[in-house]
Amino acid sequence: MYRIFAVLGACLTLGEALAGTFYPLNGNRVVGEEELYTVTRQGTTLESVAAEFKLGLTNMLEANPGVDALLPRPGTTLLIPHKLILPDTVHKGIIVNSAEMRLYYYNDGQVEVFPIGIGQLGKNTPVDWVTKVERKRANPTWTPTAATRAEYAEMGEPLPAVVPAGPDNPMGLFALYVGRLYAIHGTNADFGIGLRVSHGCVRLRNDDNERLFNLVPVGTRVEFINRPIKYSAEPDGSLYIEVHQPLSRTEEEFDNIEVNAPFNFTKADLEFFNRPEIDRDILERALHERTGRPVLLNPPEF
């Protein structure tokens, strides 16, 4: 079932835009529902739609193959992928899944999901790492590394040793520092959430970042994972899979976006795929199409 939005002006109401980001923890790992959105205004960008619905650009691109990546035409119906599978890990604190470019915050019987930007190729966001929020800072400064300053200098954009706090700071206005070298922070850009844009840190849109900053206490557990494939056996016996494009590991993979990057299947993946209830054709199609949407693998027979 879908919720349907037809947007006649610049955006829909904020209350509806936020409705897909909170999920109660009720024993199911498949949560939420998909929505349909009809573009009615010339000049509407896919990024603006993603921002209204609290999604990253890659989430929208995966769920809407073939749609213009920048300017979907008026009359185009977009699928809003607010249905998802919760990651198969401890449901506590913050979980960052780089492969789907989402951050999960578990708190008070529910999970709130935020779209994120992650590290560029070669400047990867950590994976397979459990740490905690070491400290928080409003109006952070940014101290770029020597390598970063050299990189910017080559582009003709020299950086000072310390970038002062303020709206022009790439850290945004709030930062959660995790471990010793990384942060979850805002941005000074209007584009890049759902993309590989940072120097390894986790980047959020500024309104999401401020909310997370105010919610999360120091000491909160933080786990970084990289799982392009999520699946679940639901309490009612339904089997679901959600497949994202794996993160590129080489320049060749990154540049050749028309070719699906290979998966590194785990033993647990293969054991799940071999369950006899699974329709093999549906499984193969899901692994090929990689829409980032939960797919039912054992539909009832009619």
Image (cartoon, helix red, strand yellow):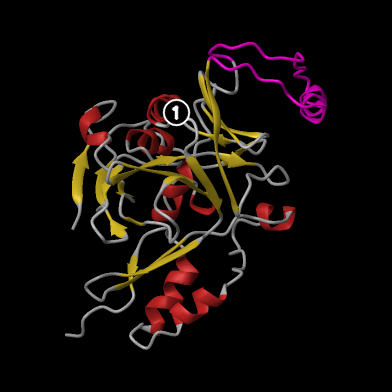
Q: Which residues are magenta?
A: 139-168
Position of 128 with respect to 51 (left or right) is right
Residue 13 lies, in percent from the top left, at 21, 28
Residues 109 and 127: in front is: 109
The reply to whether residue 206 is in sight is yes
Q: Position of residue 98 (x, y in %)?
A: 54, 49
**Residue 8 percent across, percent down from the top left:** 21, 31
Q: Quadrant of the N terminus?
A: bottom left
Near-viewer residue (204 or 68): 204
Q: Quadrant of residue 10?
A: top left
Seen at 23% across and 56% down, the residue is: 26
Identify which amino acid the numbered label 1 is placed on: Asn
> Residue 69: in sight, yes or no?
no
Q: Residue at x 81, y 22 (%)?
A: 153
In percent of the image, x 68 and y 52: which residue is there?
Answer: 255
**Which picture quadrant has residue 159?**
top right
Q: Residue at x 20, y 85 (%)?
A: 301
Residue 113 position, x and y percent, is 37, 43
Residue 164 painted magenta: yes
Question: Is 266 situated above or below 181?
Answer: below
Q: Is residue 118 left or right of residue 53?
A: right
